[in-house]
Amino acid sequence: MYIVLGPATSPGDTPLWEAITLNDTGSGTHRTFPFAKLPDFVRAVEAQNPHRVIRWAWADARELMPALLAAGVSPASCHDLRLAQRILFTAATRAQNRLPYTPTIDLTPEAAPPVGVLPARRQIEGQTSLFDDLGPASLEHHEAAGPSASALLTELHTQLEAVAACPAPARLSLLLAAESQGALIAAEMKHYGMPWNRTIHEKILEHALGPRPAGYDRPYKMERLAARIREELGAPNLNPDSPQEVLKALQAAGHSVTSTRKWELTEWANAVPHLREERWQLVRPLLDYKRLARLYTANGWNWLDTWVTNNRFHPTYEVGSAATGRWGGHGGGAMQIPKDVRPAIRAEEGMMLTVADAAQIEPRILAVMSGDRALAVAGRGADLYLGIAQIGERTGSVLNDRSHAKIALLAAMYGATTGEGGQLMPHLKKMFPVAIGLTERAADVGLRGGQVTTYLGRTSPAPSHAWFQAQRNQVTAADERAARSAARAHSRFTRNFVIQGTAAEWAIIWMAQIRKRLRTERRFGKRMQTRLVYFLHDEIMLYGPVGESARAAEIVRESAQAAAELIFGPTDVEFPVTVVTTDDYSQAK
């Protein structure tokens, strides 16, 4: 049963919201209430229907979930019309999908803020801290804006009819359900937050940078390095934060470097043996300064003030932000937590972190999607690359060590045609012709400007109009080279899309399975308190009481295989995950 939530169409003195029930016989009851009563309504409906699947259909979980969570309400399921619309709209552009879908309303998100721009600290009247902008006290300020419940109901009908009419409705339905679960999980992870010990973080900063500087001053240790760099280069006014100024100063001092990138400076420093010590005397402070500058700007005191509240890190996740369905982040840097600050991710007394990492997920997805039994055999156990090497050793292949096996398989999935990966590819194809055939067919489609799909039906975007123009207008040799380069780039994209996109589907269903079990299992008659608090592609983190950590680890492992079987059905391909239970995240990696 679906219940559509949105602003009521009839205006009044108090903006009302409306709930419209949709079941197998069509739309049914209509209920209206002030927005402030929404959490009470959702709580009551779920309590009255404990054994019934209620899918709350709304325009955008990002708009409603903060208010629900702040009131202690966390729905079991939803249908996020915005996320579903994005998937269906792209799928409808591929003729082979035979998906008859045209949106009835535009639910595309507002333009994303530029990278590095932080959200306003005070967003609405009554807000007193960064994370209370949609708390219960502020519900009364929420205005009935956006598409009405009736308009959302029409869009829901359109989406469901399109899915029912496509050639693989069960798969596409699972994808939309998983994406919507992702919206719930993303909102919950932001709400609960990752444990982050401010005191430990401050000690890390003080040890690396020195005391917190005043205003816009550099930290003491960065300023000391800056002075040394200026002295070494004979440039007293040099700004070491400017790569352009540093490069000019290096060249003015007679050093033949063309960039300030770490790898190039390192290569230059080691190029002439008898000058190595002298050059490293110059390069080392430059690299040290860059390292400290990254820490200061990305995870320094200002970052700590902005993103960590009450020893919790509250990043914003963007579900399916990449074309393949991979998640992104809006601020806070959750997609890349540097090693320097990981010791600050620390469990409180009586609590424990459960950190899980899926082992070589993309090669395993390739094995199950292609049905290549030899690759499935190689994947039995924790190390698929080692399994390939063992098969290679038994069969006399040059792919008889783990490093070569890994290079070859990554080349197959990412389209490397040169270097060591390109040289090893023929041997891999001989060992696993079915699996490599799948990647090559996807690549061929991309070479012609076509679109491909993941296992559940997420569709790759078509090339741009300029791409097709470049393929048609090959007048000069330069035109031909540009067209071939563009065609190969799109070919590499589609080759990897089918694998990476399906891996993203597995990951989100893995999390959905974990969430479901954490919500439904009882310990001594009470619900588990462990929660998902972090996700990065194929790594997750749970946080909960020490007494639940052993069961939480079991749930994580069980859910990994359950997710694969929900997508693909019974399979011989194993999906092992490495699970570490610890109170210190830096010890888990």
Image: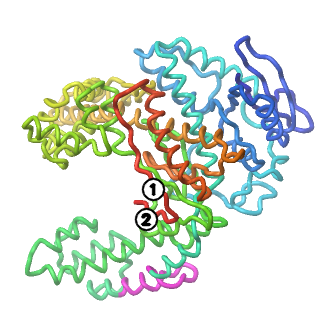
Q: Residue at point 86% right, 30% down?
A: 32
Q: In the figure, 448 relative to 222: above or below? A: above
| Residue 290 visible in the picture | yes
Badge 2 marks a residue whose secondary structure is helix
**Tally of numbered discs:** 2
Residue furthest to the front in view is 524
215 in the magenta segment: yes
Give the amino acid type for the residue marked by disc 2 in the picture. Gln
Q: Residue at point 56% right, 58% down?
A: 117
Q: Which residue was labeled with disc 2?
A: 587
Q: Nearer the viewer, residue 351 or 295?
A: 351
Residue furthest to the right in view is 13
Question: Start and end of the magenta stretch?
Answer: 208-227
Q: Nearer the viewer, residue 101 or 584?
A: 584
**Image quadrant assignment for residue 288:** bottom left
Single out the mark in the foreground, 1 or 2: 1
Quadrant placement of the C terminus? bottom left
Q: Are marks 1 and 2 in contact (CB under 8 Å)?
A: yes
Q: Position of residue 332 (x, y in %)?
A: 54, 59
Q: In the figure, 26 relative to 106: above or below? A: above
535 in the magenta segment: no
Q: Position of residue 568 (x, y in %)?
A: 42, 25
Q: In the figure, 28 relative to 307: above or below? A: above
Give the amino acid type for the residue marked by disc 1 in the picture. Val
| Residue 473 visible in the picture | no
Q: Which residue was labeled with disc 1?
A: 580
Q: Position of residue 420 (x, y in %)?
A: 13, 46
Q: Residue at point 56% right, 50% down?
A: 113
Q: Nearer the viewer, residue 195 or 163?
A: 195
